[in-house]
Structure formats: structure tokens, C-alpha cells
Image (cartoon, rainbow, N blue to C red):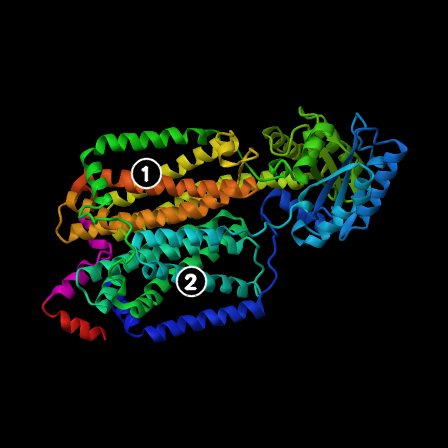
Amino acid sequence: MASFLYRLGRFSFRRRALVTAVWAAVLVALGAGALTLSGQLSNSVTIPGTESQKAIDQLADRFPEAAAGGATARVVISTPGDITDPAGQAAITGLVKGLENAPKVAGVVNPLQMQAISPDKHVALAQVSYRVPGFELTDADREGLMAAADAAKAAGYTVDFGGDAVQAMPATNATEGLGVAVAAVVLIITFGSLLAAGIPLLTALIGVGIGMAGITTASGFLELNTNTPVLALMIGLAVGIDYALFIVSRYRHELTIGRDPEEAAGRATGTAGSAVVFAGLTVIIALAGLTVVGIPFLGEMGIAAAITVAIAVVIALTLLPAILGFAGGRLAGGKIRLRRKESTTTHGERWAKFVARHRIPVLIAAIAGLAIVAVPAASMQLGLPNDSTAAPDTTQRKAYDTVARSFGEGANGPLVIVVDLSGSTDRQAALQQAAAGIGGLPERPIVTPPKTNRGGDLALLTVIPKSGPSSTATEDLVSDIRGLNAGLGSATGASLAVTGQTAANIDVSEKLADAMLPYLALIVGLAFLLLMLVFRSIVVPLKATLGFLGSVVATFGAVVAVFQWGWLTDLLGVKTTGPIMSMLPILLIGVLFGLAMDYQVFLVTRMREEYVHGADPQQAMVTGFRHGSRVVVAAALIMISVFAGFVLAESSLIQSIGFALAFGVLVDAFVIRMTIVPALMSLLGRGAWWLPKWLDRVLPDVDVEGEKLAKQLDAPDERELVDASK
């Protein structure tokens, strides 16, 4: 592989105008496609196979007038006085009339007719149902809903809105631009050159542009979720900078030892480029593995991001050497001096020697620190965001708190029970048994009178729990209701299913939790085989994957401590705490695994390169660390800064994602890769590179470290090889 990439790098360097023109044409073509062929992204989240989704599909087919799959809104009108006095009744009547006239509204439950009045008569609760799901509502639709309350507010009443109908699409922010700015600063410090710093940014932005244009074009032919481009943008920008950073760093090294620019570009692409290929493959495996989770939109996100990573790899191997051809030898040295005196011993080398001298205490301290931080992970509670996790000053959170205070927590998360009566000979008796069974459960929920479809073979019951939608008591209630199905079927021939927003959230959380271990086993297993091929060792891939698991568990612990337990919330600006978003663990595993393996490949391939070229294990570790650590530190600082920017968001959900990714990269880069890895490499010595002889014969030799390439190029017939490559 190294020889092929060497020839590819030299070809791209020499034919730089052609290579650049080809990539420019691709960017223009996909950009034109994005402008002319793009379709509408949707926020549809379907979870095939779950009971709640099956019930919604059943309702859509046999009871469409119930609009069970449509969005809902809870409208809370309150006053310090009596909401049922004549003025209050007039305000409620006007509010209901305005809500009925709002766009796409299917129906409104009048609180005066349903007696949805709080015991103290200060609060009334109206329920609004829509004909369409929440993701199909526009900002104009939501503004129409809000406008219905203008008259009541003008009369002195307080009106707040909750429910999924009020949850607008996430607004874009400037975090991507902030990340690029931080990346530029870090790259300038790393290279000491504006030109050298600009090249990784340029190629990364081109790769992301091609990826985003491709996704937008594909939306004209495929139904894609609105979240699909998000992960692709974030990961594409991250790895695009990382891969170019690694190759440019090696190119500058080759220039400083006297290579001519074309030869330096070829060698950098052959050696660092090989590491980029395998680092990219590990990221692609992690992202494409999201398809096994069984949730379509997560699979879409993973595939889109994996394609963007593949584009970043190809650009790093072709367009980057072409751009280096335009820069030539001007990248040999930095012109921005940030230090008065250059030292022959780098910080990385000093740290590697310190770790080697004190490897046992360093290992004990690092592992103990990870274990302590990981302790809260044992208490992790998963869930999906709802109005209780909204910022305290939002109308959703105010509505949630008012409803909980006036009607009980459960009124914020009613359950919808679908009773299929088609197999029952006495449908009325079956309905009565279902209602009595639910009402007689230990939780003692409130059961409303049933509604039946026109054919009389399907009925709806609304159940109001006493506990909130995110509580374990509500999860237990859903489980207990579903447990009644077998007895109802044997006694009456009817069947029941639980759906609604709360039940769907519970089902999603359970499905994601069940998929986490198989997903982890898949990506870790495949990456272990890939790393074994790269490093020709069993020990190095084993410690790489175990180190990743340590950083993941520690990150879970930190997330629970902050966003579930409430530690350091004032310092970080976190306004609400609650269950951890159920999708966060899998997203964190996928993203962090890809980046962690990047750092592992970048750092340890240089150690192996030194080792196979004759250095003893200790010296190979120190030399490899000296060359690789600067790149890993720069890449990690860029990623930490980008992800940490999301902690400044208003949404606690976005805050938790940003914090988890930033903390995970921090731990994996600086504790695992920069501390535990060199300590273990020093401790194991030659044992780190142990591989059974039979396995050594079976595994193909991909020559990632460029050993064969170096022998060919440094042989007396080097010129013949160079000429042949032309």
C-alpha cells in the first residue's frame, strides 16, 4: 500500500493542475445538483418493530380521524383568580375558538366541557391535536398556534404552550464557524506558518462542501432526516483537518531532512497517507455500524457521515499532494516564531521519557483517575427530551411546571391505549375489562372513557399516570399495562397496545439500550482486526480497544454527574438536569471510537515505523511519540474546542452532546493515548509487537509504516523506481 500511495502522491504533485481541476469539477457539479435537485428533509422518526409504532400504524389505517400520529399541544391558561368565573369562561371560549382556527389543527378539547380545571380553579388545560406530525409543522403554523392566545393575554391571563407541536426545528448556530476559527489558531501554533495552517483547513472545507452537496442532492431522490447532515458536517470537518494535518506534518518533516518537494510529497503520502487510510477505515466502520441499531434515521446519519469521511480520505491522498505541489518548498519552515529559542528536545519527547521512567506510577494514577470518574455511570438513566428538560424560561417548561403543579406530573405525559376489538365477540365487555384492568393496577392511573372508530372494531383509551413522563414509575406502568394483553386476549379475544409520545420515548430508549452492546461489539471487533492488520500485533490493538472502553465509561460517568446529578451546573451554564438522552451513548461510542482510533493510528504507526527500521522498543516509543504527539495534541485541541462550543447552547440536550464529545476526546487523547499508551509500550517492550508466527504468515502485509517503500527508495536502484513511477 505504501508504494502505491507513494506513486499516487507524486502523480498528484506533478499533475496538480489536473487533479485540482477534477476536484473543482466534482464540487461544482454536486453544488449545482444541490441547488436544482434537492428535496425536502423531514424530521420523521419511525422505530420499526416497537409496540408504540405498530399501534400508531394501526390507528393510521383503521382510525385516521383520531389523528393519533399527529402533533399535540397542551395549552395552559391560568390566572390568580377564578378561571371559571364569567370572564374566565369567556377567555377560555375565545382561546379555544382561536386554537380551532389555527393552521392544520384537527381538534381542540375544551377544558370547560371536559372539566380540565385545576382543583383550585386557577388553571385550565386545553388539548390541541393536529392532522400532521410535528415535523411537518412550519414556523408559520406554530405562530398561528401562539397567536390564538393574544386576546387572553391582553385580558391579563397567562397562557403557555407545551407538547411536540411547539418544538421548533433546532436553530443553526455559529459553532461550526467557531470551530474553524479555533482550528486555524491551533494549526498556526502547530506549524508556525499561515500557509501550512491554511492547507488543512482548505482541504477539509472542500471535503465537507462536497459531502454536504452530495447529501443535499440525494435528498431529491431519497427521504432523508433533517439530522442526517449534522453528524456528517461535524465528523467530516474533524477528520478532514486531522488527516491533512498528519500528512502536511510528515511532508514538512521530509523537507527538513533534505528531500525535494515532489519526493517529500510522495513519501508523506506513502507513510502518513497509509495511516490515514486505516484511520479512516476505523471511523467508517464505527459510523456505518449505526445501521445495526435498527433506527432508520441513525443509520442514515451514520452512512452519510461515513461517506463524508471516505471523501476526506481520498482528498487527503490526492488533492492535498496537488496543493502541496503549488506550495512547493515554502512549507519547509515556519515564519511565525512563537518561542525565542528552539530546543532540540521537544515537550513530547520529555513527556515520553518521563512516562517511561515512571511507567508503573503513571499507569496506576491514570487508571485510578478513570475509575473514579466512571463511578456515576452505574447510575445512568436514559430517556428522550421532553418539556421538562427545556430551559426554565421557555413557554414549554412553564407549561410543564404549571400542569405538573395543578394536575399532577402525569398530565404532561398521557398514554394512549389502542384496543383491537376485531377478534372479540363481546366488544363492550372487552372494553370494560381493559379499562377496569388498567384502572386496577397498583399505580391507580386515571382512565378516560373510550372512543371507537366508525367500524366499532378499534377503540382508544387515554390513561393519565400519576408520575411524570421521564420517571421509572411511568416505565413500570407501561410495562404493567402491556402485561394485561395476554389475559385480555384469552378472556375476550381482544388485544391492547400502548402508544403515545411517552410510550414511544420509552420504546426508543429500550431499543437503543438493547442495541448498544451489539453495536459496541461490532465496531470494536472489526476495528481490532483492522488494527491487528495495521500494527501486526495482538497486544497493540487489544490495549487500543480497552483504552477506548475506559474513556467511554469515564465520559459516561462525567455526563451523569453533570446532567443527571447536577454537579458543576452553575460553572457550565447547565440549567436543567434529568435523564441522559437515550441516543447519546451510541452516538458517543461511534464518534469517539472513530476519533480515538485516529489518534491511536497516528501515534503508534510512527512508533512501529521506528521499531521496524531498527530502533529498540524504548527508543522507538520515545521517537515515535516525539513525532506523533504534536499532531495528536493539535487534532485533539481542535476537536475539544469545536465540541465544547456546543456547551454554550440554550438546549440542555445540545449541551450534553457537546460536553460528552469534548470530555471524551479530552480523556481519550490526553489520558489514554498520550499517557497510558506510552506507559504500556514502555512496560511491554518487544512484547507489544508480539504476533504468533502462524498469524503473521496468514495476515497480508500492507506495509503501513513504509518499511518496504523505504528499502526500495534507499536502494541503489532508487532512480529506476522513481523513473518508473512517472
Looking at the image, residue 652 sits to the left or right of residue 408; the answer is left
In the orientation shown, which residue stands out farthest toward the right? 86
481 or 213, which lies in front?
Answer: 213
* Residue 345: % across, % down: 18, 46
Instruction: Work out whether 208 lies above or below 651.
Output: below
| Separation of marks 2 and 1 at Cα, in angstroms | 30 Å
**Residue at the image position 22 percent from the left and 73 percent from the top:** 725
Q: Which of 500 and 24 lies nearest the eye of the viewer?
A: 24
Q: Which residue is drawn at 31% across and 75% down?
A: 15
Residue 306, by quadrant, is bottom left
N-terminal of the two: label 2 or label 1?
A: 2
Q: Secondary structure under badge 2?
A: helix
Q: In which quarter of the image is the C terminus?
A: bottom left
Kind of residue indicated by mark 2: Gly
**514 is higher (above) or lower (below) than 255:** above
Residue 66 in percent (x, y) is at 76, 46
Q: Measuring from the top left, give residue 584's x and y in whole percent.
A: 49, 42
Quarter of the image where one finds residue 82: top right
- Our reading of the magenta stretch's main secondary structure is helix
> Could you tell whether 598 is left or right of 62 in the image?
left
For the N terminus, which image quadrant? bottom left
Magenta residues (range): 693-715
State yes or no: residue 700 in magenta. Answer: yes
Please check the rendered image and state whether residue 347 is part of the magenta-colored stretch, yes or no. no
232 up-or-down from 688: above or below: below
Q: Mark 1 points at which residue?
A: 671
Residue 431 seen in the figure: yes
Where does label 2 land, which residue?
207
